[in-house]
Image: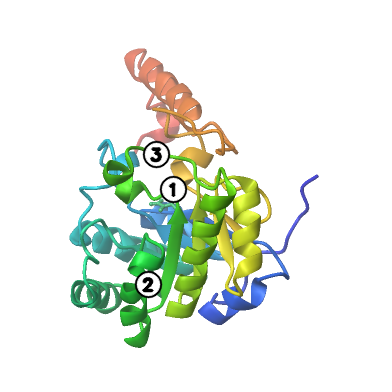
Amino acid sequence: MSIHTPKIEKKVTLTTISRMKGVEPITMVTAYDALFAKLFDGEVEMILVGDSLNMSFLGEEDTLSATMDQMIYHTKAVCNGAQLPLIVLDMPFGTYTSPETAIKNASRAYQETSAQAVKIEGGKERAHIVEALTKNSIAVLGHIGLMPQFLRSDGGYKIRGKDQIDIDVLVEDAIALEKAGVFAIVVEGVKAEAAEAITKAVSVPTIGIGAGNSTDGQVLVWSDMFGFFEAFKPKFVKQYCHGAKEIREGLEQYRNEVKSREFPSSEYTY
Ligand code: KIV
């Protein structure tokens, strides 16, 4: 049964998010432009300008070719559209290969947009990068489990946490990220038991995507959840509306009306 929750009325900060762990589930969606960001304003605590835009907007096969310029352009648009959610810019592949590169690129995110945090993929092997950023006052959202930017080195999109050994690895990753100063951790594509173990092991909120129902929050890609992305539908995606179908129906009606000269009628004419 769904409940009616009040709209968010105050600017969401890092402190708001930290305080929500164990109190109230956190909602996060992706957005890539001002129009949709405005629709999401006041409805969710966080917006992720995800590098998934490389697939759903640019039509590429994966996220790997997204660039810092692209992420900055879209984050500016999202910040123009939404005032209240905490906005996170997703650092693209290759932009945080060393602490110096990460600081240089993440500083651009802060200087050129009003994003409040950046997201980077990786566990304990990238904790030193997270630490370099947080020590330089750049807030970081971690991302462990299935990491789309590493699909080539990982040999494809693989669900994690299927046995105790891998659950222990994921828990170690989360603890290392917490020590390095992340304010929250995205946990993607892991078995529900693994996500639960991670969530219990850290004091920062976990935000799940394809990670079951015991994380501290959930994130979905907007074009998936509203039925616009039709190339494939992962098991964890619930479609809250059928966007592509409605657009097609609207377009068909428009085409028919233009062809039959029903549109524009006098109502739409100067
Ligand atoms: O790029 C993205 O949209 C993401 C989410 C899937 C968490 O990283």
Q: Residue type at mark 3? A: Tyr
Q: First in sequence, mark 3 or 1: give its number.
A: 1
Residue holding disc 3:
157
CB within 8 Å, label 3 to label 1: yes
Judged from the image, the secondary structure of the residue bearing numbered disc 1 is: loop
Looking at the image, residue 149 lies above or below residue 69? above
Residue at horizontal 31%, vertical 81%? 132
Residue at horizontal 34%, vertical 20%? 258
Residue holding disc 2:
127
Q: Does mark 2's beta carbon lie closer than 8 Å to ligand 1? A: no
Crowd tier of the residue under label 3, counting other residues whose Cα lies within 10 Å: few below 14, some 14–19, many 20 or above: some
Judged from the image, the secondary structure of the residue bearing numbered disc 3 is: loop
Judged from the image, the secondary structure of the residue bearing numbered disc 2 is: helix
Crowd tier of the residue under label 1, counting other residues whose Cα lies within 10 Å: few below 14, some 14–19, many 20 or above: many
Residue 229 position within the rendered picture, expressed as x and y whole percent measured from the top left:
42, 34
CB within 8 Å, label 1 to label 2: no
Q: First in sequence, mark 2 or 3: give its number.
A: 2
Residue 219 visible, this angle: no
Front residue (pair 216, 245): 216
Indicate left or right for 242 with 33 as reference.
right
Q: Residue pushed farthest top?
A: 260
**Label at residue 146:** 1
Q: Residue type at mark 2? A: Ala
Q: Is the C terminus in the top left, top right, bottom left or bottom right quadrant?
A: top left
Residue 200 position within the rendered picture, expressed as x and y whole percent measured from the top left:
66, 66
